[in-house]
């Protein structure tokens, strides 16, 4: 192995991170609170890697992960093996991350690990199974179009994204219906390589005991070196102030004011102040809440930074009676201006926000399975490894009111924004 | 005086370190001590659910509890929000046919203050009309949003035919827009005054606080709740007496189909076999409708297991509802007739074992299992012991259980009549009979 780094990420269980010679990051967390183990493979890919010609294929690939592979020839055999192992599994495709995970009894860890290895390294992309899966994915697409916020999601892509195809992981029907074996293999060749992935294991395991098997099995996965993930461009731009009246569900009003935020790819130094700021604004006793909810027309409000590499956003938003939407927007804009006044950010408030973030982390670390399937994959991708997550508490602890002012001056003050006013009377995307 | 009833784990699949005791006013408490962390889970169950509602007050309990949780005389709105800010604790509310549940997630150090504040909100609610109005509007929006989504609404459509007129489970614990919008603070106060009684309450806990300390905390907070409680009528059988179908026309690209049918009550000797049978149905629905016929992204089957009256169900979203419904009936018939490989039956038990292990990592899920088991059967171990019964289940046992219980079918369909021919719909029989 190139290195082994041992640290205590969590208050509840120890975590070890190492890297195999082929570039695969291996993260293992021991949690003996229940006799199960979770194995997750996270890959630096997703909708953001797509072009108009491949829009939807990262997600299509995820579906094919659960089909035949070099060890299990078709989905029927695949499902049968899952039943034998009592396996609970799933996969998700986002714009910036794809992950696959399974949980088995800890006495079946070896079998679970082998199952994951075969699925990630040896998918067959059987043409008949691909044809079948086109219809399955089209039904998934149709279901999404029925969602009350489908129109709003589409409108956000239209307004914020430089390349819309990189923001819509579900893709478009024409591409979904044309997916074939060749293009699946191209996707695999480019992104599904150990140097572009991490293997995460948490649960009732002994790290030292399982490490040889992990190393022996996953070292066989051939180094790739072909991923362009880290060199992809930012995919968000708000060149000028834009306001869109968006059609939404009956009886509901919603306002969102969006600014471009710092990228997790190369502007991480801004993100600590961004997170403390978001938590500060979320306090239910803070000015933002008091002025807009307790003494204002909103039912709830939030202000947050979304940690993303390619589409990072800073958002002010809230729910409101649709008939009060215009008034609410003006009040929210005024509140944003208030943030730049002297004394808006107090040291005691910042201290509380930092403590809230510490507690938030403790709550998130309650379940080691959630750590394997949610927390570690997200931060491994967005932070470019787990160092960001590991050093996060220390970095938050030194954020000051001055840092937050600098952050707001750089990313919000006099910057163009996109305003979405969602009411039943708004516009609808075809 | 608090009496420790027992501390034990009778069987391997029941968790260890579980303690039961009663507060002086009779509130029953079940606590699972989980050492090694500092995150606490505590669930407050208010038993009753749909049984204490009528047509005109559906949603009143959800409204009253949410309104109460905005502050009390001792912890007014602003002070209560400060506490929530400092602790970052969360309260998650859910309302179902048999009970309302509030679940608290917090750090151990904050438990005393939060429990005291919560009890105070229930007993001496501030109920500021402006704050309560905001809560009410938020509830209405959430409800409307749910109803706008056919994927949520389809379950209610299927209820219409299955449950039968007048069944209490047709009353919605989270309300309907017309009732929810009619409530005011006086309604909330009156409801809390009549319902917050020790006999209506069960508390469950999972976390590091030891039972002795928890008893003291709960006595100081919930010990103030007056004695007494409601007498709940038995939930009647579902009123379905023939196959029924309720169809709703809506502009959706995908149609939604749900069918419900009777299931044994919790604690019945058929429960494990029926539950396994529906687990097998779930596996086969995936195999037949998704893997082999590519008719859907989402198809599943299962059974409820924590209500006084339960049901089996099958669900699908698809552009071909008629073909799908026919295949769903075929899958169910195969299980009823025993045309199933034993490995599929064993697989259901294997999956359940893994699920129990996953559940053990979550304080929230532990609290829910302890509470729902106790409320539905009087024994918190019921959901844990189910696994024991699943082991070694045979094809014969599951087919017999399903055959005995799955009779008349209550179908619900939401589809777009511009895309789908509604005249082809029929209340397909699960028993292989032709309906006229």
Image: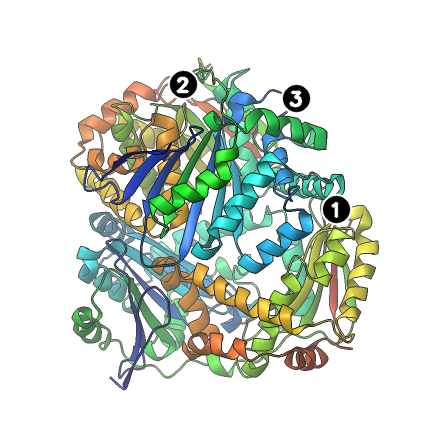
User: Do the residues at discs 2 and 1 belong to one chain?
Assistant: no
Q: Secondary structure at mark 3?
A: loop
Disc 2, SS: loop
Q: Are marks 2 and 3 on the same chain?
A: yes
Q: Mark 2 or mark 3, which has the lower sequence index?
A: 3
Residue B257, position in %: x, y? 49, 34
For mark 1, name the chain.
Answer: A
**Other-residue count near label 3 (Cα within 10 Å), few / some / many at <14 / 14–19 / ≥20:** some
Disc on res. B56: 3
- Residue placed most toward the observer, B218 or A74: B218
Residue A424 - label: 1
- Residue of label 2: B408
* Residue occupying the point 54% across, 64% down: A356
- Give A397 or B309, whichever is nearer the viewer: A397
Category of crowding for the residue at label 2, using alpha-carbon neighbours closer than 10 angstroms: few (below 14), some (14–19), many (at least 20): many
Q: The numbered mark 3 sits on a residue in which chain?
A: B
Q: Is residue A289 above or below residue B188?
A: below
Q: Left of A68 or right of it: where is A344?
A: right
The quarter of the image holding the N terminus of chain B is top left
């Amino acid at each position: 192995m190139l290195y082994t780094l041992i640290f205590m990420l969590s208050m509840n269980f120890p975590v070890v991170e190492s890297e195999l010679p082929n570039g695969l990051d291996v993260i293992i967390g021991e949690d003996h609170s229940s006799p199960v183990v979770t194995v997750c493979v996270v890959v630096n890919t997703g909708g953001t890697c797509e072009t108009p010609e491949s829009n939807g294929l990262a997600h299509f690939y995820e579906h094919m992960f659960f089909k035949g592979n070099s060890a299990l020839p078709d989905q029927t055999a695949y499902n049968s093996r899952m039943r034998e192992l009592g396996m609970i599994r799933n996969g998700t495709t986002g714009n910036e991350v794809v992950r696959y995970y399974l949980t088995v009894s800890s006495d079946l860890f070896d079998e679970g690990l082998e199952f994951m290895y075969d699925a990630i390294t040896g998918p067959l992309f059987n043409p008949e199974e691909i044809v079948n899966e086109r219809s399955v994915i089209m039904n998934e697409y149709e279901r999404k179009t029925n969602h009350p916020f489908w129109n709003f999601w589409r409108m956000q892509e239209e307004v914020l994204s430089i390349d819309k195809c990189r923001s819509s992981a579900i893709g478009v029907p024409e591409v979904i219906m044309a997916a074939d074996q060749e293009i699946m293999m191209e996707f695999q060749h480019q992104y599904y390589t150990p140097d572009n992935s991490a293997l995460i294991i948490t649960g009732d395991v002994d790290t030292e005991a399982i490490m040889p098997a992990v190393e022996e099995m996953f070292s066989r996965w051939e180094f790739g070196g072909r991923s362009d993930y880290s060199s992809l461009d930012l995919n968000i731009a708000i060149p000028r102030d834009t306001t869109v009246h968006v059609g939404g569900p009956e009886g509901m009003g919603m306002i969102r004011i969006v600014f471009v935020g710092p990228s997790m790819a190369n502007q991480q130094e801004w993100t600590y102040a961004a997170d403390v700021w978001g938590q500060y604004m979320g306090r239910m006793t803070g000015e933002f809440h008091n002025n807009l909810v307790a003494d204002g027309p909103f039912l709830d409000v939030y202000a947050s930074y979304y940690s993303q590499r390619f589409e990072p956003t800073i958002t002010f938003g809230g729910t409101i009676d649709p008939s009060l939407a215009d008034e609410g927007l003006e009040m929210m804009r005024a509140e944003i201006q208030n943030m730049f006044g002297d004394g808006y950010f107090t040291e005691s408030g910042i201290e509380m926000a930092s403590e809230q973030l510490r507690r938030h982390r403790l709550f998130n670390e309650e379940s080691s399975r959630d750590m394997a399937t949610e927390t570690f994959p997200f931060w491994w991708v967005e932070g470019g490894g787990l160092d960001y997550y590991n050093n996060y508490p220390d970095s938050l602890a030194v954020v000051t009111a001055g840092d937050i002012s600098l952050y707001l001056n750089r990313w919000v003050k006099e910057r163009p924004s996109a305003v979405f006013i969602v009411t039943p009377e708004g516009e609808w995307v075809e | 005086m608090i009496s420790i009833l027992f501390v034990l784990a009778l069987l391997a699949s029941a968790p260890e370190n579980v303690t039961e005791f009663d507060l002086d006013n009779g509130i029953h408490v079940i606590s699972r001590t989980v050492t090694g962390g500092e995150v606490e889970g505590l669930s407050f169950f208010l038993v009753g659910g749909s049984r204490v509602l009528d047509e005109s007050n559906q949603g009143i309990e959800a409204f009253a509890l949410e309104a109460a949780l905005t502050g009390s005389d001792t912890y007014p709105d602003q002070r209560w929000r400060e506490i929530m800010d400092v602790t970052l604790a969360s309260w998650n509310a859910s309302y179902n046919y048999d009970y309302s549940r509030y679940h608290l997630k917090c750090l151990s150090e904050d438990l005393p203050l939060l429990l005291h504040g919560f009890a105070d909100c229930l007993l001496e609610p501030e109920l500021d009309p402006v704050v309560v109005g905001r809560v009410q509007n938020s509830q209405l929006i959430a409800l409307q949003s749910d109803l706008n989504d056919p994927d949520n609404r389809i379950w209610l459509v299927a209820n219409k035919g299955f449950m039968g007129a007048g069944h209490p489970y047709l009353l919605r614990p989270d309300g309907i827009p017309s009732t929810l919008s009619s409530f005011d603070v006086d309604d909330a106060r009156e409801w809390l005054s009549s319902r917050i009684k020790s006999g209506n309450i069960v508390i469950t806990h999972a976390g590091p606080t030891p039972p002795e300390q928890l008893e003291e905390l709960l006595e100081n907070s919930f010990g103030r709740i007056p004695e007494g409680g409601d007498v709940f009528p038995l939930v009647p059988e579902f009123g379905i007496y023939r196959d029924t179908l309720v169809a709703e026309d809506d502009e959706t690209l995908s149609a939604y189909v749900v069918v419900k049918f009777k299931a044994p009550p919790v604690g019945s000797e058929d429960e494990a076999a029926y539950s396994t049978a529906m687990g097998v149905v779930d596996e086969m629905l995936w195999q037949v409708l998704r893997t082999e016929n590519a008719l859907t992204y989402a198809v599943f089957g299962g059974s409820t297991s924590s209500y006084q009256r339960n049901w089996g169900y099958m669900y699908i979203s698809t552009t071909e509802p008629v073909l799908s419904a026919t295949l769903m009936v075929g899958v169910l018939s195969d299980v009823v007739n025993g045309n199933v490989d034993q490995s599929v039956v064993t697989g259901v038990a294997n999956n359940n074992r893994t699920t129990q292990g996953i559940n053990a990592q979550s304080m929230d899920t532990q609290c829910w299992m302890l509470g729902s088991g106790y409320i539905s059967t009087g024994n918190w171990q019921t959901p844990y012991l189910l696994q024991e019964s699943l082991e070694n289940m045979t094809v014969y046992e599951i087919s017999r259980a399903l055959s005995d219980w799955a009779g008349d079918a209550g179908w619900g369909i939401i589809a777009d009549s511009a895309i789908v021919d509604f005249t082809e719909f029929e209340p397909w029989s699960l028993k292989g009979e032709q309906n006229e």
